[in-house]
Image (cartoon, helix red, strand yellow):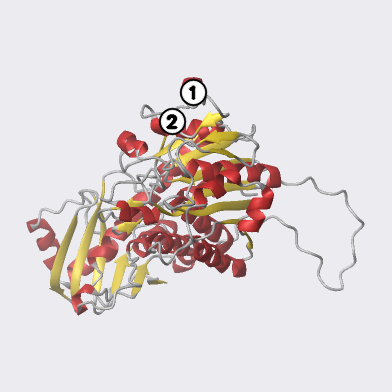
């Protein structure tokens, strides 16, 4: 991960300098000093390029003088900059500075907290997944390893960064998981990688095939039965509110009344490590993308890492159902009837609607085992949500208005946007089966809505939200704080959602 250092404002003697410029703003602070040191070369170049500070626009000036290799200016726009806007600017600068050995961002006109967010965006944008590259030309390899953030209060900026750095590390971890090929990231290997959370204080428990069968995970096991790679369910528990014991030698206090049990916050992820569609097999074109059908589970793992890494003051449990959906002589067939952990029976009309079967059992198990305060599930569940919302918003379905409003607000603040979609009895009727309690699909109309209605049948009165993230977990192009590929969507959104609403 890109190394970040915070220092007091001073013009660097070499390397690159990045400037954050508001719309039509006059040079100030380090920007003004750099222009003076280069005898006005920076100002003239920006003027000739007609750079006005429009949001997201950049201008690069090569060898302007004063020992600087280049100056890169990025526009912040006219409005008061938000944390999200500053992160995007930091990411844009990181992309522009990737071939510089030394670089600094002039953040002296920002608050220390916003300066830390500039670093956050830069670190997120600097991510690369190069694990399987064996041959790269020198100009294809990034040279930037250290970024100096020049700010008026380095100590305050560093303190703010210490709450953001674990989140950045968690986003990187999730991106790594989503980027892995399916021949490497099997359900068993995914479960093993979750153990990286143990040193952070997260209790990690893995249920294998025997435990799943004994517990009654009939729907999840039906999805997995066609694959040679056996399923797993991973439970991650983090306690950020548990009281510490008395210091050694301290007088023991009288036994107090047993404190009321704190219900945990529950996050659940679909983890289909590869989805062929099963017997209802997908078309060959683009099937390679189905390695990231586990991105919901990846986001839950990343969230748990972020919360534990920054020592969030909350009780949280994360559960992920890990399977591979393959066609074989042992695979489930269209028309099969399976019994879920909740006891409800499901007629499997389409074996490619498998993620909801996985979630049905994990959600039921979560309620039985933990009695959570609420549940939020994440799943790359339907292509229909991409048709409806494109790659700009995840679909949000909820049985609780407060939960939905808080998720929407967190999405807006972090840039990981969600849009509420309807749940309705009319959609539920589409799931009626002639021979079982329900079908697993409701037909083509409102496919995302009927999928959410299906999941809701396994929610036993607990406040619940479902995020259909199919359009958000992989990007075919670079974005300001996200390079092409796995986005890590959901980690920042849910970290903010917990921080602003549920930490004691």
Label 1 or label 2, whichever comes before in sequence order: 1
Q: What SS does tag 1 mark?
A: loop
The extreme top residue here reads: 426
The extreme front residue here reads: 329
Quadrant of the image containing the N terminus: bottom left
The spot of residue 20 in percent (x, y) is 27, 58
Mark 2, Cα crowd under 10 Å, few <14 / some 14-19 / many 20+, is many
The extreme left residue here reads: 48
The spot of residue 172 in percent (x, y) is 42, 63
**Does residue 43 appear anywhere in the picture?**
yes
Lateral position of residue 130 relative to residue 503, left or right: left
- Residue at (34, 67) in percent of width and height: 129
The spot of residue 175 in percent (x, y) is 40, 60
Compute the Cα span from label 1 to label 2: 8 Å
Identify the mark at residue 308; answer none if there is no mark: none
Nearer the observer, 238 or 150: 238
Q: Is residue 387 above or below residue 71?
A: above
Q: Which residue is mark 2?
A: 449
Asked whether the residues under the numbered discs 1 and 2 touch, taking CB atoms below 8 Å apart as contact, a structural biologist would say yes
- Residue at (81, 70) in percent of width and height: 247
Lateral position of residue 260 relative to residue 351, left or right: right
Nearer the observer, 135 or 428: 428
Identify the mark at residue 424; answer none if there is no mark: 1
């Amino acid at each position: 991960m890109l190394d970040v250092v915070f220092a007091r404002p001073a013009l660097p003697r070499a390397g690159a300098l990045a400037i954050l410029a508001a719309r039509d703003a006059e040079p100030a602070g380090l920007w003004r000093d750099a222009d003076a040191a280069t005898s006005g070369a920076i100002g003239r170049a920006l003027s000739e390029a007609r750079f006005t500070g429009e949001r997201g626009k950049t201008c690069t000036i090569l060898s302007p003088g004063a020992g600087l290799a280049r100056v890169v200016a990025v526009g912040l726009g006219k409005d008061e900059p938000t944390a999200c806007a500053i992160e995007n600017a930091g990411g844009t600068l990181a992309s522009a500075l990737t071939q510089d050995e030394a670089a600094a961002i002039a953040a002296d006109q920002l608050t220390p907290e916003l300066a830390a967010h500039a670093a956050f965006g830069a670190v997120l944008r600097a991510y690369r997944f190069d694990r399987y590259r064996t041959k790269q030309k020198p100009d294809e390899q990034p040279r930037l390893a250290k970024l100096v953030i020049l700010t008026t209060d380095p100590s305050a900026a560093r303190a703010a960064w210490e709450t953001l750095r674990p989140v950045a590390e968690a986003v990187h971890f999730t991106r790594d998981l989503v980027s892995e090929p399916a021949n490497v990231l099997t359900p068993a290997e995914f479960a093993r990688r979750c153990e990286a959370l143990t040193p952070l204080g997260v209790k990690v428990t893995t249920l294998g095939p025997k435990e799943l069968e004994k517990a009654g995970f009939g729907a999840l096991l039906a999805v997995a039965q066609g694959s040679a790679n056996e399923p797993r369910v991973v439970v991650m528990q983090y306690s950020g509110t548990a009281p510490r014991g008395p210091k050694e030698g301290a007088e023991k206090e009288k036994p107090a009344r047993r404190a009321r049990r704190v219900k945990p916050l529950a996050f659940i992820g679909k983890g289909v490590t590869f989805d062929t569609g099963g017997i209802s097999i997908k078309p060959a074109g683009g099937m390679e993308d189905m390695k990231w059908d586990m991105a919901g589970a990846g986001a839950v793992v990343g969230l748990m890492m972020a919360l534990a890494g920054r020592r969030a003051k909350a009780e949280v449990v994360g559960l992920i159902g890990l399977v591979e959906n393959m066609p074989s002589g042992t695979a489930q067939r269209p028309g099969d009837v399976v019994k879920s952990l909740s006891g409800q029976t499901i007629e499997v009309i389409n074996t490619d609607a498998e993620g909801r079967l996985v979630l049905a059992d994990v959600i039921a198990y979560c309620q039985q085992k933990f009695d959570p305060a609420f549940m939020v599930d994440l799943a790359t569940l339907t292509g229909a949500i991409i048709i409806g919302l494109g790659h700009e918003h995840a679909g949000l379905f909820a049985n609780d208005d407060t939960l939905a409003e808080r998720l929407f607000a967190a999405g807006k603040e972090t840039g990981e946007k969600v849009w509420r979609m309807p749940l309705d009895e009319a959609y539920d009727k589409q799931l009626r089966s002639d021979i079982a309690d329900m079908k697993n699909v409701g037909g083509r109309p409102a496919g995302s809505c009927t999928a959410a209605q299906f999941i809701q049948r396994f929610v036993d009165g607990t406040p619940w939200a479902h995020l259909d993230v199919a359009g958000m977990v992989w990007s075919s192009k670079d974005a300001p704080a996200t390079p092409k590929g796995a986005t890590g969507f959901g980690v920042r959104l849910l970290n903010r959602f917990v921080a602003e609403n549920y930490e004691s």
